[in-house]
Image (cartoon, coloured by chain):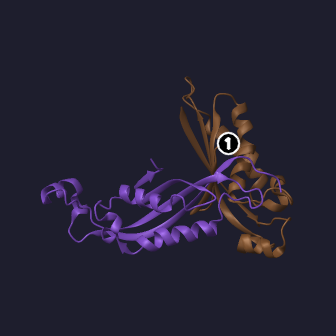
Chain colours: A brown, B purple
Amino acid sequence: MVFLTRRATFSASHYYWNDAWSQEKNEQIFGKCARRSGHGHNYTLEVTVAGEPNPVTGFVVDLKWLKDVIEREVLEAWDHRHLNLEAPEFAAGKAVPTTENIAIAAWKRLAPVVSGAGGAHLSRVRVYETPEIFAEYRGGQ
Amino acid sequence: MSATAGKAYFGRRYPLSASHRLHSDALTAAENRAAYGKCNNPHGHGHNYVVEVLVGGAVDAETGMVINLADLDSVVLERVVDRFDHANLNLDPLFVNHAPTTENLCKAVFLLLDGTVQPAKLEQVRVEETENNFFEYAGE
């Protein structure tokens, strides 16, 4: 098994808010992140795919193909957008766009496409919100 | 609020600057020099370390978090950064009988944090001594 990682960047705005809570509780739990005008980050997405190198090409997956998949499935939906207002998985009443949930949502967008291509599978998604803060998801329950 | 599936991981990096000297009382002066080279110079030297803490757990359906960043910061600053930042590692009681190699620092940080990052679980500690070398410990 060989692991291949492709990195991509996107910039997006968000805020943290739970509609089931009062404004006071949102501000207490989420701090500055609860400000409804939102704020933004330069995110870095690391997508790790695992598989055996193809005996003819030597590729686990074609890096250009993986780049296109990441752009189509994730970046088109999230790059230069407001996650709460424009990304369906983070709409009001759905998941809070924390770094953890962004990693899980990226996984859900990418896993079927990577597996559907045959051979390789998605192994890990890591999302850096800043160079010092990241979350990752490896699938499963 | 929709439930989010399964286990996720959250990581946070903390810079700290400290000095150390690699030296073992169990070795002769010549053996220390052979084992540790420049790192055995008598007056020590320092590094800008980066401690990377990785915790794992269920994503809370209400907050969307494995752990609240502010809570993790508070624990790591109190138990690790305040202890080692701008300090001489050789003077710390943890390194009286162990050379303050980055391997040993990494294990020490793991043991200082293990069990203190509820509701998450400590998964791994990575300590970067320079940009080109780092050490990881995930428990026994």
| Left or right placement of residue B81 versus residue A67 in this view | left
What amino acid type is highlighted by mark number 1? Answer: Gly
Q: Quadrant of the C terminus of chain A?
A: top right
**Rendering coords of residue A33 (x, y %):** 73, 70
Secondary structure category for the residue under label 1 = loop
Note whether residue A83 is visible. Answer: yes
Counting from the top left corner in percent of width and height, residue A78 is at: 76, 55
Residue B17 is left or right of residue A60, and the answer is: left
Q: Position of residue A87 (x, y in %)?
A: 81, 55
The answer to whether B102 appears left or right of A65 in the picture is left
Q: Classify 10 Å Cα crowding around label 1: few (below 14), some (14-19), many (20 and above).
A: some
**Residue A129, quarter of the rendered image:** bottom right
Quadrant of the rendered structure where residue A114 is?
Answer: top right
Horizontal relation, residue A70 to residue B12: left or right? right
Q: For residue A35, say whether it is visible.
A: no
- Residue at the image point whose x is 43% and y is 59% from the top: B128
Badge 1 is on which residue?
Answer: A139
Which residue is painted at 37% across and 55% down in the image? B103
Q: Quadrant of the N terminus of chain A?
A: top right
Chain name for mark 1: A
Instruction: Tell me what residue is drawn at x 53 percent, y 59 percent.
Output: B53
Q: Give the percent coordinates (x, y) of residue B84.
A: 41, 70
Residue A12 or residue A139, whichever sits in front? A139
